[in-house]
Image (cartoon, grey):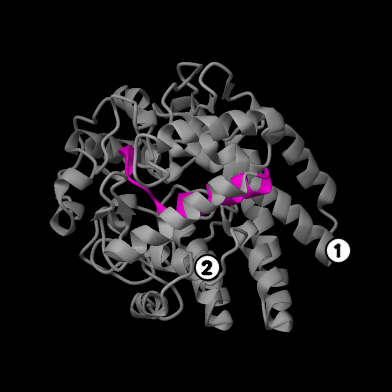
Amino acid sequence: MQIQESLAQEARRILQANDRGGFTIPTAGLYPFQWLWDAGFTALGWMRFDEKRAWQEFELLFQGQWPSGMLPHIIFHKPEPTYFPGPERWGVARTPPTSAISQPPVVASFVRWMLEQAQDQALAEAKARSLYPKILAYHRWFKRERDPHHTGLITSFHPWESGADNSPAWDEALARVEVDPGLPPYTRRDTSHVDPSQRPHQAEYDRFLTLLEVYKRAGFDQLRLLQECPFRVVSLLIDGVLHRANRDLLWLSERFGFGDEAEIAGWLEASQHGIESLWDEEAGLYFNRDLIKGAPIQVGVSASFMPLYAGTASPARAKRLLGTLEGWARQVRYLIPSTDPSSPRFEPQRYWRGPVWAVVNYLIALGFSEYGYAEMARRIRQDTLELAEGTGFSEYFHPLTGQGLGGGAFSWSAAIYLAWGQTSAIMR
């Protein structure tokens, strides 16, 4: 399936319209700041027609990096009243203001891909070299402050951090968070931009914001939060992305002679075992894990396929995952629904409880391709392109009808169309 040039032009126009002077907002109104993993995907889109601008996306992203190495999930470069919770609710005394949690760490992988694809190799090498120590510090933060016991798995403290905010995988863990009786009053902004039926419930938002208060009371001390935070889970999105990112960071270290290979290889060995411990043979899926309960979260979600992208799965497990996704495909028109469509928790229109997300499709299709399942990879790519061509560049899509959902003129959906659509190949 080839892309439509008129739609490719529209995708470029969206990125340019959402450019705020070196960083790209996801969409006007609903998300008016710079988000971490959004920045990675949008950089891939920029790379197709403006390489200098693509590298600038990461340079502005790292303006928000903390001294600890943590890279926040939101950088509040400029004030905007259309979004909640803004910097005043997070209470982070930094310039620029930021949030206090991270997000799936895609940057190292995307820097490698951009370096490999660049037409301007001199520029790409200079930018990748300058970004490397910042990315290394970020990955060291994950290991030091989110896996201090060297389990090979990262502890996540907030559903927002996983990228999949209201996934049914978090239902029980989030329900255990007691809403702070002194929670400051607030007015949501998201439901003024998007139909509430497509967004998280109010009860979830109360708990999301309660966790922010927990963060602030702990002074953002990660090791204290490991003991005190009432929400502690292993997210397959974070761990799968981080494992792949460490593989690519290792490649960058070797490429430039930085000499950090032994340290990074140790991380990879640990996370290989950690991720594979999340496999459920009976279900034919990987499951997220509830660290407070000490048990797998037995809900199939799109992140259950992320060990293919990470490259940790054995050939036998990859084949089982293929069979599982083929079963899902018989129940929906478009892959990949964010929740198992046979689950009673499947909601095809509500955010991360069922809709298709182009960016997750991109990662999982790459995984299937690398394991030799080209037909499934092509199916995922084709579905993704058809969704954009049918209803435009929406934030996410209905897996049964193809309806565009959430925000419109969305940067990362446009970027995926550009990054993936200009070639018939599955590979990046």
Name the chief secondary structure element in magenta.
helix
Horizontal and vertical percent position of residue 412: 42, 63
| Looking at the image, residue 237 lies above or below residue 296 | below
User: Can residue 252 be found in the magenta stretch?
Assistant: no
Number of the front mark, 2 or 1: 2
Residue at horizontal 39 percent and vertical 51 percent from the top:
357
How crowded pointer 1 is (Cα within 10 Å; few <14, some 14-19, many 20+) is rated as few
Residue at horizontal 36 percent and vertical 68 percent from the top:
25
CA separation in Å, label 2 and label 1: 29 Å
Of 182 and 98, nearer the camera is 98
**In the rendered structure, are the residues bearing label 2 and label 1 in contact, judged by CB atoms less than 8 Å apart?**
no
| Looking at the image, residue 253 lies above or below residue 14 | above
**In-image side of 385 versus 114 (left or right):** left
Residue tagged 2: 419
User: Can residue 354 be found in the magenta stretch?
Assistant: yes
Going from N to C along the chain, the mark reached first, 2 or 1, is 1
Residue at horizontal 55 percent and vertical 49 percent from the top:
377
Horizontal and vertical percent position of residue 391: 27, 62
How crowded pointer 2 is (Cα within 10 Å; few <14, some 14-19, many 20+) is rated as many
Residue tagged 1: 257
Disc 1 marks a residue whose amino acid type is Gly
Horizontal and vertical percent position of residue 49: 52, 81
Horizontal and vertical percent position of residue 163: 42, 46
The part of the chain drawn in magenta is: 352-372
Quarter of the picture holding the C terminus: bottom right
| Looking at the image, residue 235 lies above or below residue 39 | above
**In-image side of 83 versus 72 (left or right):** left
Of 279 and 70, nearer the camera is 279
- Element under label 2? helix
